[in-house]
Amino acid sequence: METELIAQAVILLISLGALAKASQYVIENAVVLARYFRISEATVGFVLISVSTSLPELSVALISSSAGEGALSVGNVIGSNIADLTLVIGICAFIRPLLVKKRDMMEIMKILLITSIIPLVLIYTGNLDKFGGLLLIGIFAAYVFYVSRKKIEMEKDVNHIRRPQALRAFLLFSGGIVGVLLTSSFAVNSAVTISAMTGITKTFLGATIIALGTSLPELAVDIQAVRRGRYSLALGDAIGSAMTNLTLVLGVTALFNPVIISMSIFLTIMLFLLATNMALMYFMTTSNKITKKEGVMLIALYVIFVLVTSGVQISVAHLLPIQLPF
């Protein structure tokens, strides 16, 4: 057992290293595509990268929903969103203060806040069914269409990208995304195996490892973006991934089966998600950057979320005759 545990740890480390390398290709070529299509980096982060890096959550949604375990997908989506908005942005801000373009970011944050409330209402009223799923997918499609049409003025200089360069960038970008998804999948599987072998509870696993694991693409991509000074790209990805999860991923989940969830756990994690949204909006409005201190506060908020949610899940598990699905 000890040998297998060491082997899984090695696989995890190799996967994380490969994940970081693949994310470099994503960032470099996303910037090229941004210049070619004359759209802002925040938009590229939302439309291209965030949707691609949300594929792990989408995969979990498809598998769990087809098996009638939609509550697992809901827990993963909301847990991943809180990880994106606290841990991912917090770590990035700790590495380097994030400069904020308020015009780009605040609009996306307001839309995110609205799309955080809509699933809350749908689940609370028992309407996260096929109709609710179509509504969420429609919201996602409408906003992607809107944000994709927002061009920016760019000077005609030597940095203008020609079509052959853009095509090459698209191919490398696609290959990088595939690499990110594959390596993150290996990393998640290794983390789950390690957790099972070391006796970590399923409740803690669902609240941390699974949600954090499916957020690995965002974390890897955004760290690389921050190191290259692409702050809008990083923020656009983290915030865009959260919105993608709440609309596209939850919408797909509801299309397969109506979602039935433990309301006490759901309300706890949704309150944390709304609190996270408000905290992030406050940090963005106080100055033109998210500081290292604010990054530490976001990381601390994630730790509190894990502790509180684990406590609530354990309490509910003792009250119910069957084990909760997440």
Image (spheres, rainbow, N blue to C red):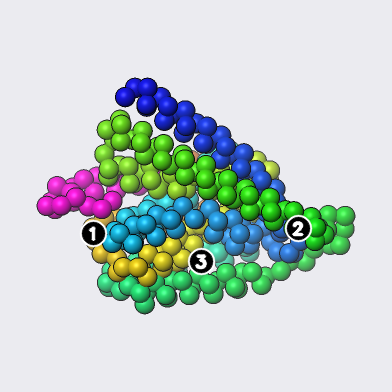
| Front one among 55 and 37 | 55
- Mark 1 highlights which residue? 262
Q: Earlier along the polypeptide chain: callout 2 or callout 3?
A: 3
- Secondary structure at numbered mark 3: helix
Q: Position of residue 8 (x, y in %)?
A: 41, 30
Residue at the disc numbered 3:
110
Residue 111 shows up from this direction? yes
Residue type at the position of mark 2: Ala
The kind of residue tagged 1 is Ser
- Residue 185, relative to residue 74: is it above or below? above
Q: Is residue 85 left or right of residue 92?
A: left
Q: Amino acid at mark 3?
A: Lys
Residue 312 locus on image (x, y percent): 23, 49
Name the residue tied to disc 2: 166
Question: Magenta-highlighted stretch: main secondary structure?
Answer: helix
Q: Please state the horizontal and vertical placement of residue 288, each as a whole percent of the image.
A: 62, 53
**Which one is in front, 131 or 42?**
131
- Based on the picture, tell me whether residue 317 belongs to the magenta stretch: yes
Q: Given this view, does label 3 or label 1 mark the residue nearer the observer?
A: 1
Task: State the separation of the CA atoms marked 2 and 1.
Answer: 47 Å
Task: Report the span colored magenta.
Answer: 298-326
